[in-house]
Amino acid sequence: MSRVGSWVAKARAVTVLTGAGISTASGIPDFRGPDGLWTRDPEAERLSSLDAYLGDAGVRRRVWQGRLRHPAWTARPNPAHLALVELERSGRLRALVTQNIDGLHQLAGTSGDVLIEIHGTLRDVVCLFCGRRSPAGPTLERVRAGEADPACEDCGGILKSATVSFGQALDPGDLQRAQEAAASCELFIAAGTSLTVYPVALLPEIALASGARLVILNAQPTPYDDRADEVIRAPLAEVLPAIVRSAAPG
């Protein structure tokens, strides 16, 4: 870890990609790990399909109930999230690209200047017909009050959390920002991500092609392990704070 800390200390531009593994210490389970949501319940993965959501009101009703119970509403940022805030304050963080939809990086204090929520956020809802976007709270209150499948109050269209589902394109602007951050960094850190979901999984490739060092912090193997300058398999709530501390001056 001290070696990675020295790389961070010398870098003028660090780009970090985070996945579900950074939020497990906050009580939010990952997807593909040994005890992940989709490992335990393969049917749950279907609920993340845009086609299924659009075509089946029963799927939408089930998804809305799941949104009510999502652990993100009670979760708090853990030391790994807070360490990345410290990295931003040091002036070295070029961008923080997150695949997570839980909003914990924002709650920790990461600024919108560096944060790219590449898969969207659970904390907003959007109408799939007219595009109206608003905070999720009022819509969730409608679900609690008995609306099983709430419609857009403007046009009557289908509402969905402002997250990117399977079969749904990423926001082009977010993707461009993420790619530019990968191409312009000196050090790319992938933390808590399996690096198997595309096109985000191409970001380490872009960083390597541009001459950056690659560090992987993940409990499970990834397709990039044999090309990384360092691979660490330790809890992120321990390893990320240790890396940022070792990079601090003095």
Image (spheres, rainbow, N blue to C red):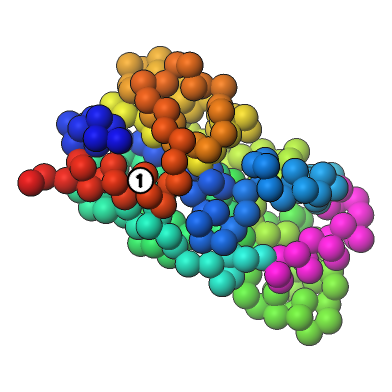
Residue 161 coordinates in the image, percent (x, y): 68, 59
**Residue at position x 20%, y 32% from top?**
6
Task: Check disc 1 and report its element: helix, strand or loop.
Answer: helix
Q: Nearer the viewer, residue 74 or 125?
A: 74
Residue 202 coordinates in the image, percent (x, y): 53, 25
- Hey, which quadrant is residue 62 in on the image? bottom right
Q: Is residue 182 visible?
A: no
Q: Nearer the viewer, residue 103 or 131?
A: 103
Does 240 sit above or below residue 184? below
Q: Is residue 81 left or right of residue 85?
A: right
Residue 106 coordinates in the image, percent (x, y): 43, 60
**Residue at position x 37%, y 25% from top?**
230
Does the segment drawn in magenta span residue 68? yes
Q: Is residue 12 left or right of residue 223?
A: left
Q: Which residues are magenta?
A: 52-69
- Hey, which quadrant is residue 123 in on the image? bottom right
**Residue at position x 20%, y 41% from top?**
247
Magenta stretch secondary structure, dominant: helix
Residue matched to label 1: 240
Point out the residue furthest to the left here: 250
Does 94 sit above or below residue 89? above
